[in-house]
Image (cartoon, helix red, strand yellow):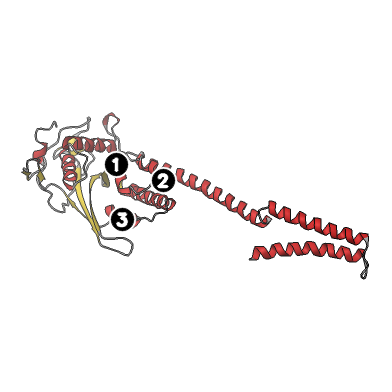
């Protein structure tokens, strides 16, 4: 309505200009050739004005508004691409970043532990993330001399997310707590991901190991990227994919469990010296055990093995 009023005023102004010219050229009720020329000029002026308005798509102001909206959209898209690249670099830096203290033969702590987890999964013959498999991997690491534990977190329902529980493996190295995850990308999968978000998921290897600070940054970055991806697909983030819920998995209250039986000394690995009790030099043994972890494994024939160590008997050490 306002745009039509502006256009009407502009047309009226054009009539007024010609009308004033006519008053200067004629007087009274006399009709002269000059008056007829003025009428012709007025007609040409109106036709020219309407033709120009038609070319402008109904008004120059509307065209300028559309152009401005296009430019804003292009600028927003450019900023979005820059932010996507920045997020990707940050996540890549956290995944491929500092790997901890180096031991003999150029082997770093993270690489050593991740290779051990991969061997454990191959020995167990599965890439499943069941509680039994996680317990098996934890037991493998402890037999190898690492202070590993199986952590069980649980959180109550809140206004932002539902209640839940989660299990993960941690390992204590020189007073630093690391969290080990297999197929971490599965914790961030969503429906109809954008190409950029899908490329973020591909940055995660099968086995990831982060200290608590690194993992918090990863979760924050991935949840923000997840929310943006869902928004572009006209979808809402489900409660179990929101930052508060995902953070609670690793940073809420938890109980840490280890095998209750005394571990046998492990043999040396990769030239890394092992000390009595199976601890790697520089790796401290946890003094506080939060409970037993003698869980059972059910074989294909229904055989229950009360101690996971039986699974590893006969394995090359």
Closest to the camera, between mark 1 and mark 3, is: 3
As displayed, is residue 310 above or below residue 154? above
Could you say which is closer to the camera, residue 171 or residue 129?
129
Q: Is residue 297 left or right of residue 161?
A: left
Q: Which residue has dot 2 on it?
A: 194
As displayed, is residue 83 above or below residue 122? below
Closest to the camera, between mark 2 and mark 3, is: 2
Count the labels in the image.
3
Quadrant, the N terminus: bottom right
Mark sitting earlier along the chain (2/1): 2
Q: Which residue has dot 1 on it?
A: 208
x and y percentages locating residue 187 in the rendered image: 30, 48
As measured in the structure, the alpha-carbon distance from the residue carrying label 2 to the one carrying label 3 is: 19 Å
Closest to the camera, between mark 2 and mark 1, is: 2
Quadrant, the C terminus: top left
Residue 240 disc label: 3
Name the residue rendered at 23%, 45% in the picture: 171
């Amino acid at each position: 309505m306002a745009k039509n009023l502006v256009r009407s005023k502009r047309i009226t102004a054009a009539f007024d200009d010609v009308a004033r010219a006519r008053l200067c050229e004629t007087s009274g009720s006399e009709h002269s050739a000059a008056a007829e020329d003025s009428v012709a000029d007025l007609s040409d002026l109106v036709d020219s004005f309407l033709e120009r308005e038609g070319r402008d798509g109904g008004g120059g102001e509307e065209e300028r508004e559309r152009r401005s909206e296009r430019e804003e959209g292009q600028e927003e898209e450019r900023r979005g691409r820059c932010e996507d690249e920045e997020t990707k670099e940050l996540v890549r830096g956290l995944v491929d970043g500092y790997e901890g203290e180096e031991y003999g033969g150029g082997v770093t702590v993270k690489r050593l532990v991740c290779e051990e987890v991969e061997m454990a999964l191959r020995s167990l013959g599965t890439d499943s993330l069941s509680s039994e498999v996680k317990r098996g991997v934890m037991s493998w690491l402890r037999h190898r001399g690492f202070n590993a534990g199986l952590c069980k977190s649980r959180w109550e329902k809140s206004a932002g997310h539902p209640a839940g529980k989660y299990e993960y493996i941690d390992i204590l190295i020189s007073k630093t707590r690391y969290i080990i995850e297999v197929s971490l990308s599965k914790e961030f999968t969503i429906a109809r991901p954008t190409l950029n978000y899908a490329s973020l998921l591909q940055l995660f290897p099968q086995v990831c190991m982060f200290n608590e600070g690194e993992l918090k940054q990863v979760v924050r970055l991935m949840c923000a990227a997840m929310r943006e991806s869902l928004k572009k697909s006209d979808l809402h983030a489900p409660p179990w994919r929101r930052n508060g819920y995902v953070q609670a998995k690793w940073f809420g209250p938890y109980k840490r469990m280890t095998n209750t039986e005394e571990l046998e000394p492990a043999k040396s690995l990769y030239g890394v010296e092992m000390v009595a009790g199976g601890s790697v030099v520089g790796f401290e043994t946890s003094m506080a055990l939060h409970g037993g972890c003698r869980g059972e494994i059910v074989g294909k024939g229904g055989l229950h093995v009360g101690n996971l160590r039986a699974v590893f008997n006969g394995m090359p050490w």
